[in-house]
């Protein structure tokens, strides 16, 4: 009622169930990737995402990835999910051969490296098999610095994985960059490495998000 000449603003229409946490509008909460922009089988995903495989992959099998559209009621749907949701699906096989290793990663465009220095960490939703295996999230920056932190696949279902930057340590540096220190002002990319055993496309990942201590995680 009355008069308002364009002064009212509205954002984030959201369906909810009782007890859900509202999605925050904090400027210090940043979604890195929620996979909703990709079409099923979209070649655009390969413009940023990639897989890498180690020695003797004829026996090992290596790693692969794709976008999966999960419908309401699907066995891998998030509890309380309403409507379709797209996730990153990852599979690997490092059970055979000698020196098997593989992983899946993402590189930002050369002219679009983001500045993560004002955040305390990165988090994402992960659905594994609960087999107790260890995976590694690695962050890379200019100078080929590579810092990483391990997390466990210890839940048979969706779980929120939070990795504070303070716990990420210098695992190794690429040749030609000994002793490099990670630069969060120009992040080159991130990846899942040190995948052990075998998981035939059973691991799902969604909502990569930067956060500051005390931020509420964006619900799925």
Image (cartoon, helix red, strand yellow):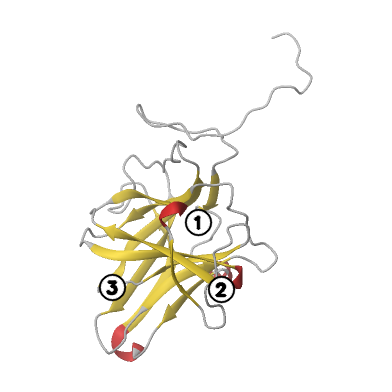
User: Within 10 angstroms of label 1, few (less than 14), some, or many (20 or more) residues?
Assistant: some
What is the crowding at mark 3: few (fewer than 14 residues within 10 Å), some, or many (at least 20)? some
Instruction: Find the residue positioned furthest to the front.
Output: 179
Between the C-alphas of marks 1 and 2, the distance is: 26 Å
Q: Quadrant of the C terminus?
A: top left
Marks 3 and 1 sit apart, C-alpha to C-alpha, by: 25 Å
Tell me if I can see residue 151 in this picture: yes
Q: Earlier in the sequence, mark 3 or mark 1?
A: 1
Question: Picture coordinates of residue 194 (x, y %)?
Answer: 35, 72
- Residue 144's label in the rendered image is 2
Question: What residue is shown with label 3?
Answer: 196
Residue closest to the eye, 124 or 80: 124
Would residue 57 be found to the left or right of residue 106 on screen? left
Location of residue 87 by image quarter:
bottom left
Outermost residue to the right: 5
Q: Residue at x 24, y 60 (%)?
A: 129
Residue 161 rendering spot, x and y as whole percentages: 36, 51
Left or right relative to 126: residue 110: right
Foreground mark, 2 or 3, reads 2
Residue 122 is situated, as x and y percent measured from the top left of the image, at 47, 51
User: Residue 35 — which label?
Assistant: 1
Q: Secondary structure at mark 1?
A: loop
Q: Residue at x 35, y 46 (%)?
A: 72
């Amino acid at each position: 009622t009355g008069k308002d000449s364009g002064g009212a603003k509205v954002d984030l229409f959201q369906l909810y169930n009782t007890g859900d946490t509202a999605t925050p509008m904090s400027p210090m909460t940043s979604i890195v990737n929620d996979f909703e922009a990709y079409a099923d089988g979209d070649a655009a995903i390969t413009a940023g995402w990639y897989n890498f495989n180690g020695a003797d992959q004829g026996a090992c099998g290596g790693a692969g990835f794709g976008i999966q559209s999960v419908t309401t009621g699907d066995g891998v749907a998030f509890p309380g999910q309403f409507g379709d949701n797209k996730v990153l699906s990852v599979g690997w096989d490092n059970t055979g051969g000698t020196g098997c290793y593989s992983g899946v990663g993402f590189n930002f465009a050369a002219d679009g490296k983001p500045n993560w220095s004002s955040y305390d960490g990165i988090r994402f939703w992960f659905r594994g098999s609960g087999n107790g295996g260890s995976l590694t999230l690695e962050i890379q920056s200019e100078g080929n610095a590579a810092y990483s932190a391990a997390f466990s696949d210890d839940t048979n279902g969706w779980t929120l994985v939070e990795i504070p930057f303070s716990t990420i340590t210098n695992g190794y540096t690429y040749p030609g960059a000994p002793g490099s220190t990670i630069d969060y002002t120009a992040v080159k990319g991130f990846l899942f490495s040190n995948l052990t055993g075998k998981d035939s496309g059973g691991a799902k990942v969604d909502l990569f998000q930067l956060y500051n201590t005390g931020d509420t995680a964006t619900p799925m």
